[in-house]
Image: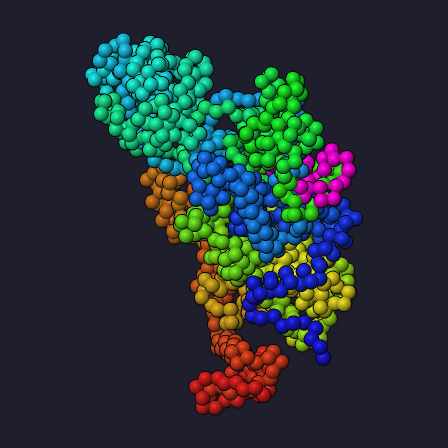
Amino acid sequence: MARIYTPLPSVPDHVGLELEVLERWERDAVFETLRERNRSGPIWSFVDGPVTANKALAVHTAWGRTLKDVFQRYKAMRGFHQRYQNGFDCQGLWIEVGVERELGMNSKREIEEYGLEEFAGRCRDVVVKSSEELTRGSKRLGMWMDWGNDYFTFSDTNIEYIWRFLSIVDERGWLYKGHRSTEWCPRCGTSISAHELAGSYVDRSDPSLFVRLPLLDRPGESLVIWTTTPWTLPANVAAAVNPDAEYGRRLSGEWVAAPRYPDERFDEVLRGAELVGWRYEGPFDQLGPGGSVEHRAIPWDDVSLDEGTGIVHIAPGCGGEDFELAREHDLPVLMPVDESGRFYGDYGWLHGLSTVEASEQIIGNLEERGRLVEAGLYEHRYPECWRCHTPLIFRIADDWFISVVDIRERMREASAAVDWVPDYFGKRMDDWLVNMGDWNISRRRYYGLPLPFYPCSCGTLNVIGSRAELEERALGGLDQLRELRRPWIDRVPVRCESCGEEVTRIPEVGDVWLDAGIVPFSTLGWQNPEWKEQGYATGAATGLTQADLPDHAYWEQWFPADWVSEMREQIRLWFYSQLLMSVVLTGRAPFKRVLGYEKMLDELGQEMHGSWGNMIDAEDAFARMGADVMRWQYCAQPPNQNLLFGFGPAEDIKRRLLTIWNSASFFVQYAEIEGFRPTFADLDQGPDCELRPLDRWLLARTDKLVAEATDALEATLTFQLIGAFERFVDDLSNWYIRRSRRRFYSFDEAAFRTLWVALAQALRVIAPVVPFLADHLWRNLVAEACEDAPGSVFLAPWPEPRELDEELLEEIAAVRRIVELGRQARAQAEQKLRQPLRRLVVQGAPASVEAHAGEISEELRVKEVVFGPVEATEVRVKPNLPVLGPKLGRELGAVRSALEAGEWEQQGDSFVVLGRLLGQDEVLVERRAREGWALAEDDAIAVALDTTLDPELELEGRVLDLIHKLNTMRKEQGLALTDRITVTLPERDADLLEHADWIKDEVLALAIDTDGGTEPRIAKA
């Protein structure tokens, strides 16, 4: 007869079964079938945050990809129609820096010498290769997406949508060119915006210099400034003092803030306001630019007295606050370094040196000229480039900005309407919106969104809003315009709309977060009049995707997104850029709910770095732990805590998953023996046979699992689903199966049908988290055993929560709690569970539990269970010395002696001793078992276990030890569950034959004999 079920090995081969399931999904078109089934269902809109296409899949990225897949699978099982569009981020420094390293380049000059067209081609090659690797890794992870219809942010379509957005921003007067001191990466040769800067600070050591600046009008005196950026000293123009602080002159003539040096004596003390206007000789006036400046002391209320000298070195060309002070006090601005962070030629011997190279020479020069007071190192947090990790500098730059003044409050209102999970992510977003500056959208780079700005000498800024407008106004170059990208776009001049003169595009490209922020509009067809097949496969994306450009009616269906999810840092990046662009275009948020999550660290809580040897490659993780175990790690993590990811936790997860695996294996073994075929309708209607109370409890417990799992996923909290599942599996394995084991040795229809329903429903609710394991077991337990069952768990709809039998659930929960307390009492008495005991007394349990006395007796191997007061205890009362000592004084000794002698009476929660009433906070009460008893209790229930053994109990304990040993021998010899055996015991165990029938039943023995051997033996009958 053909098998109904496939036997399960002792442990799952996660990697092997996952590859097998992937092949079956592909062969049976499971995903396509699911999508088609749901096409007429309600819409659930999810927008995928584009993954950067510059690498293979990393375990960090796999975390977010898992969460996205979990909720798309869940919503699909609930019948929702979805888009499943994957996204790739394709432009910017992410791509450029990698190509530079590959080509051995380290400057913008080298890129231009190499050729922008060739460089663009190499960048596109990286995107192509990486997108293929990311797709392969995501599929291996089990992620279901509409692969092949992905969106690529470097498509001309995406670029045109951003152009449209920028033209609207310009029309509203929010686009401007700013001249300011900004964070600058000298290696990348471009400015860095505030949202890119956040989170980019690292610990580092920099030179700490105290420098004297001789006063021109007070011979022999000087101001002492402090700096940690020696390279900025040649650009010094002023020294700032706190006008309300006191400043003192040392014996050496050096002026410093008096509060910074409380132990020093000063020859003269003045308020800071009196120092304002003092002229001094600059630190490097001999170099040229500094010599033309009249250096002077200026007032600044924000001068800190917590570090340095209380006199601040001001170089407006090298600092943001310095630049603003220059505006306020009409100070000159010296900009000493070029785009690559190297000194200009008019700085003499510093010419061509980088800011790092110049530091040592500057320090040496100051020391030679007697200007250096002190030099050392300073540990502090300092910003670095988020992409190449070069320390940033400040530099004056003309960048393009979007003003947020008029939309800040509208963005805050839109954000407040979003359901942020965890909720403090919403507070973080609001904090960011309150404090954010204008958006610096321009970058002096190459492979990025070409900003469509064409300034004219007549004063007009021409902003092109579409390719059609570009073609209409172009004066040439269209024939070579392969993509809306440098260098091709740079060769297309246009006609000025005001004067008609030829104008060219600025060389800057846009911030990459423009690329990603426009996605809810560009991928859904906002304001597109008609559907365009493969309308997203344009420009650089041609040949990489088949994605259509939908029409505006489609956008109205799918916007805003019901849900998006990314890690916390995206608050100031993708979530922010989307929010700003959406508020500008529609006045509302682009998403209704956001799930955020914290950082990933290694299993010891350390940052993951390749140089530290603790970085885990996704391919290595797939090979060593499997995708399901990875997904479990991700989903078990509360989103408000950092994830400690590693192979150690993976092994623990494998052990946990063994419980559901072993439960399924138990069912498969006995269902195959008995030829049991389940009925698929039982999953919705329940078994229509006579059920025992334990069966009814398991079905109710299964309903509770479904309810808890549904609530957890509706709340987008996967860790709650994991917790609910683990509690259920514990109940299933350690209560139902163990309590019902004998019912499976012979055919008990109710037991088989009940266990099958519980297993199948459990697989349905955990399937979004561990899709491979769930579908593998579903196929064995359900699809191949029921003719009318779907071939995949994902083609079975999500089980609908039913009304719970709370009374029954609470009743069995109390029974299990009593058993757990009984086991604790056994452990205290060091009595193993195979040793029967005489009696258990239970106090405080609900009356309904008394009907389960037999179950409690069997679980704890006690002959009798008594419900009533636990009297087998002794209560000791001791004085709470910190409280009673001061109160009683000399009388404390007498009270203590009386308490130790037991000369007290209890009145409610208080105790009377020697005529004194002591409150519950004045005494320490200790309850312990009397000799021959073991005690365990919680807040509501107490149990006392009689631990006295007699010959009868001892003999039964030996019988149970023998049964355990014989069954272990059966397993070791590889006997089948149905194989019969004969048993031979040593003569010393002849007294156990008093229970021969009991032993035979437990080990499937036909005969038991004794001989002169030393150990028990078995043989197959």
Which of the pair 5/376 is nearer the observer?
376
Numbered label tally: 0
Q: Is residue 535 magenta?
A: yes
659 above or below 615?
below
Position above or below: 309 against 630: above
Determine the residue positioned at 46% across, 29% down. 183
| Drawn side of residue 394 relative to residue 555, left or right | left
* The residue stretch that appears in magenta: 515-538
Report the quarter where the N terminus lies: bottom right
Q: Is residue 589 above or below residue 617?
A: above
**Magenta-colored stretch includes residue 133:** no
Q: Position of residue 478 (x, y in %)?
A: 65, 33
Q: Is residue 271 left or right of residue 253?
A: right
Q: Could you tell me residue 857's position as x and y percent?
A: 58, 67
| Residue 745 image position (x, y, % from top left) | 65, 75
Nearer to me, 322 or 904: 322
Q: Residue furthest right?
A: 40
Q: Depth check: 155 or 832 in front?
A: 155
Residue 904 appears in the picture as rendered: no
Residue 271, by quadrant, is: top left
On the image, the x and y values in percent for residue 650 come to 51, 57
From this viewpoint, which residue is outermost toward the left?
A: 251
The answer to whether 378 is drawn above or below residue 926 in the figure is above
Q: Residue at x 34, y 23 (%)?
A: 347
Question: Residue 380 vs residue 1000: left or right?
Answer: left
